[in-house]
Image: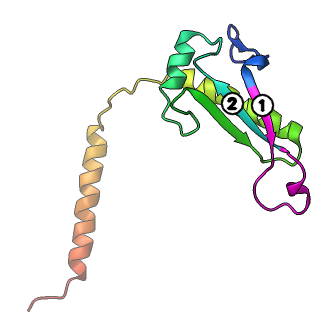
Amino acid sequence: MLVLSNAVSLSLDEIELNGIRAQGAGGQNVNKVSSAIHLRFDVRASSLPEFYKERLLALSDKRLSSDGVLVIKAQQYRTREKNRLDALERLQSLIRDAVKQQKSRRATRPTRSSQRKRVDNKTAKGKKKALRAKPSY
C-alpha cells in the first residue's frame, strides 16, 4: 500500500513496475542487468478519489501522457530495489504535491517610509553619478 494521506491510500496492484536497463556509463554490468525501473500509473483507471484524479490530470507535466498514464523512470541507484523504492516515493510526492492547496496571495503595499527610502537612495545615487561627469567651464 502506498499511503497518500490519512484517508487515501493506493494499492500497489494499480501500479505497473517494469525492470529496464539503465542508461549511461556503468561498465560491463549496465549491459547485462535491468536495474532501472519504469513505473506506469493509469490515473483515470485508479481507485483515487475524483478530486485527486482531476488535480493530477490538470498537471502540465511531461511525465503525464495524453491518455492519463503517468510514467516515472528511476535509474539513480545501482540496485533494482532502491530504484523501485525511489520511483514509488516520487509517485507519492507527485500526488501529494498535486493535491496540496495553494496559499492565496494577499496583495500588499509598500510602507510610506520604504517608499521614501527608495526615492532618497535614487537621488543620492544620481548625485554621486553627477559628480563623475566632466566639469563644464
What residue would you read off at disc 1? 17
Residue at horizontal 54%, vertical 10%? 50
Q: Residue furthest bottom?
A: 137
What residue would you read off at disc 2? 40
Q: Residue furthest top?
A: 7
Indicate the secondary structure of the residue bearing disc 1.
strand
Q: Which residues are magenta?
A: 16-35
Relative horizontal placement of residue 63, taking residue 20 as reference (left or right): left
Pinpoint residue 25: horizontal percent, then vertical percent. 80, 62
Quadrant position of residue 62: top right
Colour scheme shown: rainbow
Quadrant position of residue 44: top right
Indicate the secondary structure of the residue bearing disc 2.
strand
| Three-letter code, disc 1 | Leu
Work out whether 133 lies above or below 101.
below
Residue at horizontal 30%, vertical 37%? 111
Relative horizontal placement of residue 28, taking residue 55 as reference (left or right): right
Dominant secondary structure of the magenta stretch? loop
Task: Tell me if mark 1 has few (under 14), some (14-19) or many (20+) residues whose alpha carbon lies within 10 angstroms of its own.
Answer: some
Residue at horizontal 29%, vertical 50%? 117
Q: Is residue 130 magenta?
A: no
Task: Tell me if mark 2 has few (under 14), some (14-19) or many (20+) residues whose alpha carbon lies within 10 angstroms of its own.
Answer: many
Q: Quadrant of the C terminus?
A: bottom left
Q: Earlier in the sequence, mark 1 or mark 2?
A: 1
Cα distance in 3D space between marks 1 and 2: 7 Å
Pinpoint residue 65: horizontal percent, then vertical percent. 55, 33
